[in-house]
Image: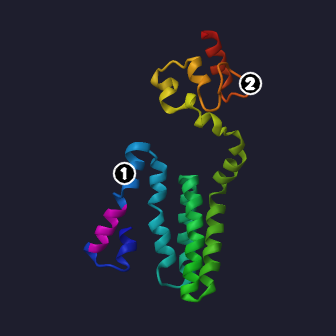
Amino acid sequence: MHAFAKEWFEGPDATLIAVAYAVNPYMLLTVYVRSAFAEMLAASLLPLILLWIVRDRPAREMFVPLALTIAAAWLTNVPAAIMLSYTVVLLLAVTTIFRRNSRVFLYGAGAMLLGMALASFYIVPVLYEKTWITLGQVLARVCGRVRTFCFGVRVKSSMIASSASCRGSQLRADCHVPGDLRRSVLAQA
């Protein structure tokens, strides 16, 4: 962020902007509450993307650095990479309009495609395996991070029956609880 801010501001002001970006409340929440370090790493790539696109220089000079930055974003954190991709398209469109030069958008789109192609060894398996994820289990009260085996809390049938996905007094077939957990709860009852 400091290199990006130095394009338009003096040294002390650029340092203040970089520090404000690093310690903004969302970044602190991400580190100390959620421990989403991959998201923090992807957030550090946003200033680089801004720098490669907004910097006033020939469009072809942004091609390789932007492609490598986009590939790095896809390899660090998929949700952040999706948001960064939308940001890149919007920023390329705005920069193209302000510069009145369509090459900026063409080189930027090519860099995006190259970046995704460089990270395709990771993106393709992620797209294939996304059907393996069951969000109902993640969002159910039974599978919260406090009620996992790591914290040593015994799961009781009353907790499963009162979860959002398992209303009622008994376990049903449509309840989003793993089979081993369901069998162990029924054995305890």
Q: Which residue is mark 1?
A: 28
Q: Amino acid at mark 1?
A: Leu
Q: Nearer the viewer, mark 2 or mark 1?
A: 2
- Point out the stretch of residues depicted in magenta: 13-21
Nearer-N-terminus badge (2/1): 1
Which residue reaches farthest left?
A: 12
Q: Position of residue 62 (x, y in %)?
A: 54, 76
Q: At numbered mark 2, what does the secondary structure look like: helix, strand or loop?
A: loop
Disc 2 packing (10 Å; few <14; some 14–19; many ≥20): few
Query: Main SS of the magenta segment?
Result: helix
Where is 31 relative to 184, above or below?
A: below
How has the structure been colored for display? rainbow
Numbered tag placed on residue 173 in the rendering: 2
Q: Is residue 3 left or right of residue 147?
A: left
The residue located at (67%, 30%) in the rendering is: 176
Q: At numbered mark 1, what does the secondary structure look like: helix, strand or loop?
A: helix
Q: Is residue 51 magenta?
A: no
Q: Amino acid at mark 2?
A: Ala
Kindly indicate the quadrant of the structure image that contains residue 72: bottom right
The N terminus lies in which quarter of the figure? bottom left
The residue located at (63%, 61%) in the rendering is: 118
Numbered tag placed on residue 38 in the rendering: none
Where is 105 relative to 17, above or below?
A: below
Q: Position of residue 161 (x, y in %)?
A: 62, 23
The residue located at (69%, 45%) in the rendering is: 130
Q: Position of residue 113 (x, y in %)?
A: 66, 67
